[in-house]
């Protein structure tokens, strides 16, 4: 089967690799344009592009996908199927109707829950006990197409968006190959989505701001969901600090939300709207990763000192 693969980040690399290892003919890869990254503002290639080029697969990086010229370029490749994994743009109807076997998407949630750009992060932030991967036949809606295959996984207490994303990427790669095999032999048939839907919008930097009036469990979920980007952040004495890891240690109240209720040589406990949060690892802006206790000692914090939303 002749396949055009649309994808951009690390999450999509495993699916592209799985297609190649399964013997599918990937005639081209479409990825987002190169971006400047880091303090040096160096131009950086998307991970999918890097991998595709290493495999000798031509890469297209259109600045605009809703153009006749781009459609004609795709049409000239004579694809049987288009596969989309975390590409980052919504495909127009003209492209959706191009391949005779349709456009297949690998989405990191149990649809119809968490349609949108950041399903992994929002599933963690909202405290889901399970999530998974869905392959679907794309339509003009935002992740509203008919479901092909689904695989579930438990959200582990230690999971963050990085570790959960890695696990779902592996699941998605396996499920994609199974989906294509099922389409080829007729064992996989599209089924309409059913159940309550929810939306997972693009993550913005401000989404990482900690509101200490929330319960400790909600703040812990935010910390997990916002790692590694943008990070769950707070301020103390005007210094912005990202909390990397924390644990809920009590469900009862411990004082004014955001206040340090215990500060010892090895512990930094903060009161929340409901419960107490043990701050285990932090990264102050411009500083290295350190333990919460080391952060407190270095700044001579005392019990009663206040973390602020600012």
Image (cartoon, helix red, strand yellow):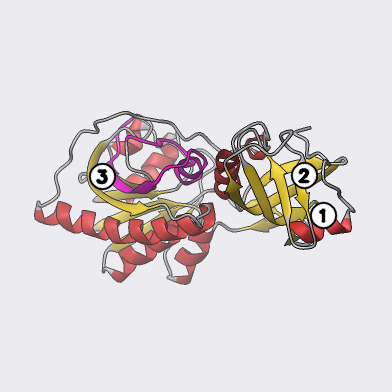
Mark with earlier residue (2, 1): 2
Q: Could you tell me residue 55's position as x and y percent?
A: 43, 70
In front: label 3 or label 2: 2
Is residue 139 within the magenta segment? yes
Helix, strand or loop for disc 3? loop
Helix, strand or loop for disc 2? strand
The image quadrant where one finds the N terminus is: bottom left
In front: label 1 or label 3: 1
Residue at 62% in and 49% down: 229
Q: Quickly name the residue at label 2.
A: 260
Determine whether, in the image, residue 102 is placed left or right of residue 38: left
Seen as rendered, the residue at the extreme right is: 300
Q: Quickly name the residue at label 3.
A: 99
Quadrant assignment, res 26: bottom left
Mark with earlier residue (3, 2): 3
Q: Residues within 10 Å of mark 2 (few under 14, many from 20)?
A: many
Q: Which mark is residue 296?
A: 1
**Do the CB atoms of the residues marked 1 and 3 lie less than 8 Å apart?**
no
The image quadrant where one finds the C terminus is: top right
Q: Could you tell me residue 108's position as x and y percent?
A: 39, 47
Residue at 29% in and 63% down: 25
**Do the CB atoms of the residues marked 2 and 1 lie less than 8 Å apart?**
yes
Segment colored magenta: 112-141
Question: How much space separates mark 1 and mark 3, taking CA atoms?
Answer: 58 Å
Q: Residues within 10 Å of mark 3 (few under 14, many from 20)?
A: some
Residue at 59% in and 48% down: 248
Is residue 190 within the magenta segment? no
Question: How much space separates mark 3 and mark 2, taking CA atoms?
Answer: 59 Å
Mark with earlier residue (1, 3): 3
Q: From where the camera sits, is residue 59 visible?
A: no
Helix, strand or loop for disc 1? helix
Q: From where the camera sits, is residue 217 visible?
A: yes
């Amino acid at each position: 089967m002749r396949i055009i693969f649309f994808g951009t980040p690390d999450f999509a690399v495993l699916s592209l690799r799985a297609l190649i290892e399964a013997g599918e003919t990937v005639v081209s890869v479409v990825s987002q344009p190169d971006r400047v990254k880091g303090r040096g503002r160096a131009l950086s290639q998307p991970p999918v592009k890097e991998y595709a080029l290493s495999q000798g697969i031509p890469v297209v990086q259109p600045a605009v996908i809703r153009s006749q010229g781009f459609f004609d370029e795709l049409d000239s490749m004579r694809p049987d199927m288009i596969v989309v994994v975390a590409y980052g743009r919504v495909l127009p109807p003209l492209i959706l109707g191009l391949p005779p076997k349709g456009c297949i998407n690998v989405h990191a949630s149990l649809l119809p829950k968490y349609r949108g750009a950041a399903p992994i992060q929002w599933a963690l932030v909202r405290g889901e006990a399970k999530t998974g991967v869905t392959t679907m036949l794309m339509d003009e809606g935002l992740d509203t197409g008919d479901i092909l295959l689904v695989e579930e996984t438990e959200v582990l207490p230690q999971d963050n968006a990085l570790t959960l994303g890695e696990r779902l990427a592996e699941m998605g790669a396996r499920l994609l190959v199974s989906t294509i095999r099922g389409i080829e032999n007729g064992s996989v048939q599209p089924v309409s989505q059913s159940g309550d839907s929810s939306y997972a919008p693009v993550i913005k930097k401000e989404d990482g701001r900690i509101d200490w009036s929330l319960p400790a469990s909600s703040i812990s979920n935010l910390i997990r969901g916002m790692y590694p980007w943008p990070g769950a952040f707070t301020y103390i004495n005007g210094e912005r600090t990202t909390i990397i890891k924390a644990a809920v240690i009590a469900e009862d109240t411990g004082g004014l939300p955001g206040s340090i209720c215990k500060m010892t040589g090895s512990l930094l406990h903060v009161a929340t709207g409901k419960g107490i949060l043990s701050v285990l690892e932090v990264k102050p802006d411009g500083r290295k990763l350190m333990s919460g206790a080391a952060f407190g000692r270095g700044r001579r914090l005392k019990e009663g000192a206040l973390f602020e939303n600012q």
